[in-house]
Amino acid sequence: MENKKGIILGEIKKYFIYFVLFSIIGWLYEVFLELFIYNNGFVNRGFLFGPYCPVYGFGAIIFILALNRLKKKKICVGKLNITPALVFVGIVAISTIVELITSYILQIFTGGWLWDYADYAFNFEGRIALDTSLRFGVGGMLFMYVLHPLFEKMLNKLGNRKVNILFISLLLIMLIDFVIKVIGMI
């Protein structure tokens, strides 16, 4: 039987891998929008050099930690299961707060943030907007009900050795990227 410390460390490794996977998916989503929706050509939408937007990874981890238990419950009004609607509302609220906080953090460290919703209806300082929060809600539902369970099964099938190799590799890549970015800002 694995000790408690080993179990916790294993969970941290898995959560970090989820963080990176969803940071990459977020980057792909952002690049897709720039290429095909806004017709701006290729734009690296990340703060770092690699193909990832960490804000999506942080949001995904927060979704898992805050909403996974709720997702597993069956809350009904009459015969209607409203759990998915509650999860959606939670995702919208969390993603809006994460995006707002991220905009302030980026502004402190870089002088600005990577998006501007000033032209969107129901926006706050161009940092957050109802339209994007609802889109994040839809994406978050896809994440919570399809992608996260799929990635969870995949990681469980890999075994500890492969998870450790993947964790160390991704951690080194992200750390090197972050250090290079910070040094470039000095």
Image (cartoon, rainbow, N blue to C red):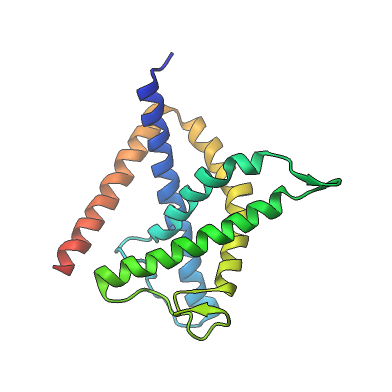
Residue 15 horizontal side relative to residue 144, left or right = left
Q: Where is residue 185 in the image (x, y as percent from the top left)?
A: 18, 68
Q: Which residue lies furthest to the right in this view?
A: 79
- In the image, 15 versus 82, the foreground residue is 82
Q: Position of residue 102 (x, y in %)?
A: 38, 64
- Please give the name of the residue rendered at 57% of the width and 52% of the height, measured from the top-left corner: 143
Q: Position of residue 98 (x, y in %)?
A: 45, 61
- In the image, 68 versus 122, the foreground residue is 122
On the image, which quarter does residue 149 sit in?
Answer: top right
Q: Residue furthest front?
A: 77
- Please give the name of the residue rendered at 45% of the width and 45% of the height, measured from the top-left corner: 18
Quadrant holding the N terminus: top left
On the image, which quarter does residue 153 sit in?
Answer: top right
Residue 53 horizontal side relative to residue 81, left or right = left
Quadrant holding the C terminus: bottom left
- In the image, 183 versus 88, the foreground residue is 88
Q: Total of numbered circles in the picture?
A: 0
- Please give the name of the residue rendered at 59% of the width and 74% of the height, measured from the top-left corner: 131
On the image, which quarter does residue 133 sit in?
Answer: bottom right
- Work out whether 111 lies above or below 95: below
Residue 94 horizontal side relative to residue 45, left or right = right
Q: Position of residue 104 (x, y in %)?
A: 35, 69
Q: Which residue lies furthest to the bottom in this view?
A: 119
- In the image, 7 versus 22, the foreground residue is 7
- Work out whether 67 lies above or below 51: above
